[in-house]
Image: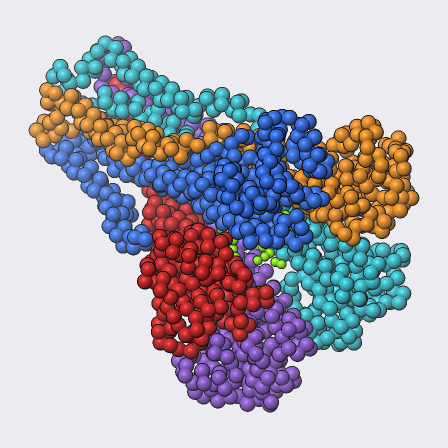
Chain colours: A purple, B cyan, C orange, D blue, E red
Amino acid sequence: MQDRLLPAQVGQFRWIDIVGLENDAEISKLAQDLGLSDLSIADLFHLDQRPHTDIDGDLVQTVLRMPVRNQPFTDQITLVLGQDFVLTLREQRRDCLDGVRKRLAGGKGRIRNSSEYLFYSLCDAVVESFFPVLEEQGDLIEALEERILHNPSDGAMRNIHMLKRDLLVLRHAIWPMRDALAILQRDDTPQINTDLLPYLRDCSDHAFQLLDMVEVYRETAQGLVDLQLSSLSNRMNEVMKVLTMIATIFIPMTFIAGLYGMNFDRASPYNLPELGWRFGYLYAIGLMVISAAVMLFTFWRLGWIFGRSGADPNAAPPDAD
Amino acid sequence: MQDRLLPAQVGQFRWIDIVGLENDAEISKLAQDLGLSDLSIADLFHLDQRPHTDIDGDLVQTVLRMPVRNQPFTDQITLVLGQDFVLTLREQRRDCLDGVRKRLAGGKGRIRNSSEYLFYSLCDAVVESFFPVLEEQGDLIEALEERILHNPSDGAMRNIHMLKRDLLVLRHAIWPMRDALAILQRDDTPQINTDLLPYLRDCSDHAFQLLDMVEVYRETAQGLVDLQLSSLSNRMNEVMKVLTMIATIFIPMTFIAGLYGMNFDRASPYNLPELGWRFGYLYAIGLMVISAAVMLFTFWRLGWIFGRSGADPNAAPPDAD
Amino acid sequence: MQDRLLPAQVGQFRWIDIVGLENDAEISKLAQDLGLSDLSIADLFHLDQRPHTDIDGDLVQTVLRMPVRNQPFTDQITLVLGQDFVLTLREQRRDCLDGVRKRLAGGKGRIRNSSEYLFYSLCDAVVESFFPVLEEQGDLIEALEERILHNPSDGAMRNIHMLKRDLLVLRHAIWPMRDALAILQRDDTPQINTDLLPYLRDCSDHAFQLLDMVEVYRETAQGLVDLQLSSLSNRMNEVMKVLTMIATIFIPMTFIAGLYGMNFDRASPYNLPELGWRFGYLYAIGLMVISAAVMLFTFWRLGWIFGRSGADPNAAPPDAD
Amino acid sequence: MQDRLLPAQVGQFRWIDIVGLENDAEISKLAQDLGLSDLSIADLFHLDQRPHTDIDGDLVQTVLRMPVRNQPFTDQITLVLGQDFVLTLREQRRDCLDGVRKRLAGGKGRIRNSSEYLFYSLCDAVVESFFPVLEEQGDLIEALEERILHNPSDGAMRNIHMLKRDLLVLRHAIWPMRDALAILQRDDTPQINTDLLPYLRDCSDHAFQLLDMVEVYRETAQGLVDLQLSSLSNRMNEVMKVLTMIATIFIPMTFIAGLYGMNFDRASPYNLPELGWRFGYLYAIGLMVISAAVMLFTFWRLGWIFGRSGADPNAAPPDAD
Amino acid sequence: MQDRLLPAQVGQFRWIDIVGLENDAEISKLAQDLGLSDLSIADLFHLDQRPHTDIDGDLVQTVLRMPVRNQPFTDQITLVLGQDFVLTLREQRRDCLDGVRKRLAGGKGRIRNSSEYLFYSLCDAVVESFFPVLEEQGDLIEALEERILHNPSDGAMRNIHMLKRDLLVLRHAIWPMRDALAILQRDDTPQINTDLLPYLRDCSDHAFQLLDMVEVYRETAQGLVDLQLSSLSNRMNEVMKVLTMIATIFIPMTFIAGLYGMNFDRASPYNLPELGWRFGYLYAIGLMVISAAVMLFTFWRLGWIFGRSGADPNAAPPDAD
Ligand SMILES: [Mg+2]
Ligand SMILES: [Mg+2]
Ligand SMILES: [Mg+2]
Ligand SMILES: [Mg+2]
Ligand SMILES: [Mg+2]
Ligand SMILES: [Mg+2]
Ligand SMILES: [Mg+2]
Ligand SMILES: [Mg+2]
Ligand SMILES: [Mg+2]
Ligand SMILES: [Mg+2]
Ligand SMILES: [Mg+2]
Ligand SMILES: [Mg+2]
Ligand SMILES: [Mg+2]
Ligand SMILES: [Mg+2]
Ligand SMILES: [Mg+2]
Ligand SMILES: [Mg+2]
Ligand SMILES: [Mg+2]
Ligand SMILES: [Mg+2]
Ligand SMILES: [Mg+2]
Ligand SMILES: [Mg+2]
Ligand SMILES: [Mg+2]
Ligand SMILES: [Mg+2]
Ligand SMILES: [Mg+2]
Ligand SMILES: [Mg+2]
Ligand SMILES: [Mg+2]
Ligand SMILES: [Mg+2]
Ligand SMILES: [Mg+2]
Ligand SMILES: [Mg+2]
Ligand SMILES: [Mg+2]
Ligand SMILES: [Mg+2]
Ligand SMILES: [Mg+2]
């Protein structure tokens, strides 16, 4: 980390990029030298903050959150803007600022001319880094939709739950970013030159765009819960229909078989005379066939069999879109 | 596309209508010539933006979304208003601007007199183009309502889910349009002449009307989820009732048959004396009939049969509306 | 319709009441003569607008919706207030303005003195006309509550769905009426004399009261969905309990009967010795009674029978309110 | 009622307390004498209003709702503040103003000195009267929670529904009370002396506190719906598990019994040789025991029996709070 | 308590810390001496208030709530700031102010210099004390998630319900704290020196952070309800599938056994000729095996067996995150 404490001297201003908070004494010392107040320095070491902007005398301190890895968990990044420096502080080495570094290295135009433009570029890079993460979430949602309709198991619900939690984390990283960026655009923030305003407004627009995406995904994910519950209920209906059909067809048939399996004394002409009929067996089987036919006819009337596939074509038009 | 880059010289101002973003160098060059800032030019190539209006010096840049095909997916259209030109830029050839083209060709009144009025006419055409799409969604909802009540299958839920997703897309195209149009009506937008204000207000009213329609459809679509879950639950009740009735009628009867199918040694007078009765068979059948009658009576008392149709008339009045 | 175009000359101002939009040329001509702008005239023929108020030069144009028949569908009414006239325009002949007509005919006080007071009276009549419609909806809800608790069939859910849709239509007629009325009370609406303000405020209060009623009914209707789902679930529980009790009582008994219906060779002393017992039949019946008793005891322990009615009294207090 | 129309002459101002609206002519006359406008007088007879405050010239007219009996239905009370009088009007004799009457009778301090302080005291008494009613609702919720977890019957859902409806009525009595009280504290209400402001702010605080309580109870009551649905679903699971266990244990056993109850001709050595075995019966019983054991083992593996109680201890910690 | 009434004389100002409200006369006397108004004194004894700040002449009275024990129930703490004193009043002895006491005892810097800084430090300590409580709630949620997915019993739902109730209590302690702190930062609160503003803003930021955490937990807890309902429904599906499979495999087999257990008179060649076949028994067993095979094949086609585990791998990718 020490090597990073060496300021990257760029034209008239420096970008000081600190990774990791272990060297707290050194960081505090540096921050004090740069003119941060005690409260601002304390905030540097306070992780898990929500994005916001504080004006600390001549300095502007903005806390943002950036997505890390391809998991939607977010990491905090603190940016401090001074007259002749930009300080960035975060815990994890991986970040989303490589694009800015390349532009600095390339030595192209405005980004080397003022600390404010670099500060804006860093904020913009953080905002932009959410887009690929959100697009991944969108793909996950589509995969889940398909899965639920074909196999509404416990796993699907667990995945929906995780998806919703991740979107919630993203929402709480993005939502307050709008305020953090709005403060930079206020009239009473003289640290930011007015010709940066269109750039910051554009950055705000992107944050709004992100929020819109999160809201769409969140609502869609909540819709997946209903889809899952309906799918489970529908699956249960099918299971029960199979059981009911098999059971109700065979139960009367089994009863008839049981009836003629009784051992009443055939000496009496009133006891089970059917057993002595020449075509008694065929008669019994006939009874069974009739009872099964009545059941099948009933199921057809209830629309449980055949009628199903016959009813769908009429209902197909809404399916066609 | 090149032919479209030739400005359609109309009176004192031009309408430049660009389709497709492939010719990016040429488009950038043209935009620079028209006086757009670098940021505005970058925005021209940024698809999937949410509707909004930016003031860029003397120019007004409005991003809107318009519905494409009869699917409710939306396409972006960027409109730029200058003193002596209107620039429109979109990706797909099909659009909703034919009405405006015809009025221009017809050479009627105000639309040929000022770029601002043309700009308004284009915005209005985009807003109006949502009405037929929303009316289609309304028809879909009514078709789904009927279908769910008659056949609450998986397909219905899938359709509801798609409908909700489409309405969500429409909502996010329409909702921010109100702000985009409101900025055009602000006092600090001198690019728009005050005598256009009633027209823009009318256009805003239509956007509000659209939003109202979307909200009604969204809430109704959410209601369909409850309808579907209740229909599935109701269907399951019916299935279970059939199973329960058949099973509980035949199970005791089958037991009685099994009882008199036992092979106890008739030598003992205490073993199955019924088997030797003259009317033993009739007695057994009588037992079975009684047990079935008790079950049917119980179902009638529980209101599962007959009583149902008898209970409905009392409850009918709320049905009558 | 023509006879209605003859202005009803009342004191110093006229009330022009037009029914039906077929005579569009005539209506446009009249509106132009009265001083309406082109945009306002176009709005006269645009049905299905949401309630709102536009200031059109010296004129005030208010669009409201009024309930028609005892169905909760709403019809549009456009009111235009001028110095010396009030214009009302609607499509259906039936309206809610008879009270105003009677007061005019009776020649009582203020309503004959100024077009503004007549305009207010008409708005007020429209607002008041929603009260009986909403009270009907309240009665429907109470009837549905009773029905769901006693007979949670598909029909109930269909009725809840229709009720919710009707309340949604009413809400979207009432909600924007508040803004339409608020604009009339603004300082920058000189067309309305300040001594009408208390009257308009009173009218606004009624609109708020209506909105409160709609919100209460909407929330209650949504509660009916939960009631319906719970009722269906409860009904299913009962059905399943009946099936389970009958099945689990008779299944072991039937098994025992089947056991002693087996045909093992009695030559071996180890095969079915029970069949040869003097009291074998009684023994078998004893086994069956014991198995049934065990099942009934289990159901009693599970609280499915008897215990139910014993548990309720303790839970009764919350029932008492 | 007449006796109440006699003003209770108290120091320099009168408190006129009217119960019942039958004597409308007399009440109108009195109100006119006190200086109320026609609109305000009409409002006196309009029941079921939502709480609000109107400024009527020099008078302040506040409509509030107060709970009646221990039922959470609310009754309207209209308070009018004049220079030298306070008028209260309500329909039912029972009220919540006895505390104020006692303080007046006791002749203690400020309440006898100004009509404004009496007016505040009456508003405060109305606000305070909601606290015991809400605490009762809280007790009802706790009783319902217990009941649902132990006996999720239809009755519970009916009670939840009634509870939600009552809380909704209370919410719509309390929510607009905040605005009604806020108007009294506005700078442009000179009828209220500024040294009453701390008192009115305190009263507003209590109204906010009430609203908070209602919102907590409403959300908790909505949670009870989920609790009820989950309880019903859980109960169904238990019922089904019992049925499934009994059925799946006995069905194979009954099949085996049936198998050896067949009457195939033993002349063929291939037909049912088991029937001739010396230990055939024991063999059949052995088969049955094995099949039952397999089923029981399966249920144990599925965690339906024994395993349940073994899994709970691990999950107990979250239960412990 | 008396010992606590002895003011802890610290530099130029005193911190008076009162525990318990029993000594009301003494407390009232002390408060009057300190300059509190009658209304403020009454408020000291009013428990269960929502957090808010009142300006009482030169004094500032802030009511906050702090969590007690590790239960999320909250206790009220009243703080009064005067020129030369800070008064704290609460009912329970345990509090969250030990950190402040240590810093005072340690005699470090600002906290001993002004009553305002002590007042801020106390507010900050109350706000900070919610963090560990909320983190505990977060752990509870994660434990519940695991439990529901593995064992969705009644207990889980009860725990979710308690969790939601506790989070609701926390939300209503935290939400109004933001307003209570905002009033301290307003321009018209001269009792607070402007150089305390950054400290109070930092404290407000922490309150917002808390609110964000509560909202995330509340939404996640609500998601657990869906998870629980889906888990129960899924579990039911499994139970029903087991029953259906066993029943539908054995019911036809049992029927066949019953068929050949009938006692028709073998004298007729048409009665049960199968019984006389040499391989009749094998034929019957063959029929049974075929019927079972058909059923198993059907279950495999429906995806109830084997196919399940075969379908999962395809659906695994969304599981992988
Ligand atoms: Mg926030
Ligand atoms: Mg949005
Ligand atoms: Mg949105
Ligand atoms: Mg949304
Ligand atoms: Mg939002
Ligand atoms: Mg949103
Ligand atoms: Mg839901
Ligand atoms: Mg938006
Ligand atoms: Mg609306
Ligand atoms: Mg709406
Ligand atoms: Mg809306
Ligand atoms: Mg709506
Ligand atoms: Mg609206
Ligand atoms: Mg309300
Ligand atoms: Mg409400
Ligand atoms: Mg409301
Ligand atoms: Mg509302
Ligand atoms: Mg719900
Ligand atoms: Mg309200
Ligand atoms: Mg609240
Ligand atoms: Mg709240
Ligand atoms: Mg709440
Ligand atoms: Mg609220
Ligand atoms: Mg709330
Ligand atoms: Mg639900
Ligand atoms: Mg609040
Ligand atoms: Mg937030
Ligand atoms: Mg949230
Ligand atoms: Mg929220
Ligand atoms: Mg919030
Ligand atoms: Mg939030």
Looking at the image, how many numbered discs can be counted on the residues?
A: 0
Name the residue at 62% across, 41% down: D12
Is B120 above or below relative to C101?
Answer: below
Is E252 above or below relative to B215?
Answer: above
Which residue is farthest front?
D11
Residue D254 sits in quarter: top left
Is B116 above or below relative to C23?
Answer: below
Q: Taking the image as drawn, is residue E146 in sight?
A: no
Using the image as rendered, state which of residue D246 and residue B61 is in the foreground.
Answer: B61
In-image side of A305 versus E145 (left or right): right
* Residue C28 in the image, given as x and y percentages of width and height: 88, 43
Using the image as rendered, state which of residue C283 and residue E193 is in the foreground.
Answer: E193
Residue D243 sits in quarter: top left
* Residue E257 in the image, given as x and y percentages of width and height: 27, 30
Name the residue at 83% across, 69% down: B83
Is B212 above or below relative to A121?
Answer: above
Name the residue at 16% across, 35% down: D285
In-image side of D146 versus A202 (left or right): left
**Quadrant where the N terminus of chain D lies?**
top right
Name the residue at 40% across, 24% down: B302
* Residue A105 in the image, given as x and y percentages of width and height: 57, 86
Q: Taking the image as drawn, is residue A264 in sight?
A: yes
